[in-house]
Amino acid sequence: MKHIIAEARKTYHQELLSEKVLTVNMHGVPSNADSSSKLSIAISKYIADKLTAEIQEKALGQTSGAKFEQINMNFLAATFPKMQNICPGKWHIEKLGNRNAIKTSSFAQYEHIDYLNDLAKANAGLAASIGNDYMVAPDVVVYRETEEDEVINSPVPIVDDTVCKQADLRKKNGGLPILHASVSAKWTMRSDRAQNSRTEALGLIRNRKGHLPHIVVITGEPLPSRIASLALGTGDIDCVYHFALYELMEAVNSIGAEDAKEMLNILVSGKRLKDISDLPLDLAL
């Protein structure tokens, strides 16, 4: 019997290979490795070999990042909506971008952001006071449609016209879809851009009205120390998910890098780093 998440994980890795996100160049350096770090090369090469990456040139930086976002979206779309038995609802998974009409203010918790933007544009003094930290742009979002009363009242009557007049989930109230999760995709963490995920998270936390969505990061970074720069600590990001955590753990143990092994154990045992396969079930909470 095929299990959906196990099969989706295999497909996920196959897409990373076929789309040339994970590659190995002629010098034996994988596309997610820091070429100036022997440990980074060793760990990422071990993972690439396990996943049978071919020797070829990697995609350009922006292209690689965009493809990583898309492949993560594909993985979530192939898994999370299928868990209706534990997380019922009409779910959508979208990759945001300049060409997508959907944005953060398209959701019930953040519909006021456009209003703030308009006020700030019209008043320089107000713009200086409130800043622009409410401008959040997740890479991938998971959101839920509102529900008809017929659905809410099945199999037993739950609501009528005398109650629940402002509940976000009730379609009759005319609200927007509900943002369930914000997913930030960072193929590597070799620059301050990786910390943008924390900035986005804080913006979602501070500027919401209502339920806080899940806030997660998915990465392909091979060095535990760099993953720790984002994963350690609590209060902003739910958790960091690695594209191949099982292979990463095997690589670190095989190479025998004690510092990396210790840090990885801290991250995993402290539930600050999980495998990509854990994400769909965690989103069901």
Image (cartoon, rainbow, N blue to C red):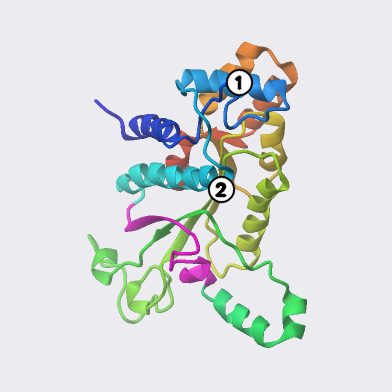
Res 128 → quadrant: bottom right
In the rendered image, residue 91 lying in the magenta stretch gets the answer: yes
- Asked whether the beta carbons under mark 1 and mark 2 sit within 8 Å of each other, the answer is no
Instruction: Please state if 258 lies on the left or on the right of 102 as rendered.
Output: right
Q: Given this view, does label 1 or label 2 mark the residue nearer the observer?
A: 1
Decide: few, some or many residues near mark 2? Use Cα within 10 Å; few <14, some 14-19, many ≥20: few
Q: Residue 260, image x and y in percent? A: 70, 23
Instruction: Please state if 114 lies on the left or on the right of 266 as rendered.
Output: left
Q: Residue 278, image x and y in percent? A: 47, 36
**Earlier sequence position, callout 1 versus callout 2:** 1
Up the image or down, 29 lies above or below 199; here it is above
Secondary structure, mark 2, is helix
Residue 123 badge: none
Q: Amino acid at mark 1?
A: His
In the rendered image, residue 257 lying in the magenta stretch gets the answer: no
9, 211: nearer the viewer: 9
Up the image or down, 228 lies above or below 88; here it is above
Where is mark 1, residue-wise?
Answer: 27
Q: Residue 28, image x and y in percent? A: 59, 20
Look at 57% across and 81% down and name the residue there: 115
- Can see residue 246? yes
Up the image or down, 255 lies above or below 117; here it is above
Where is mark 2, residue-wise?
Answer: 62
Secondary structure, mark 1, is loop
104, 96: nearer the viewer: 96
Stretch in magenta: 88-110
Q: Which residue appears farthest toward the bottom when viewing the image?
A: 122
- Can see residue 236? no
Q: Residue 194, image x and y in percent? A: 66, 46
Res 233 → quadrant: top right
98, 118: nearer the viewer: 98
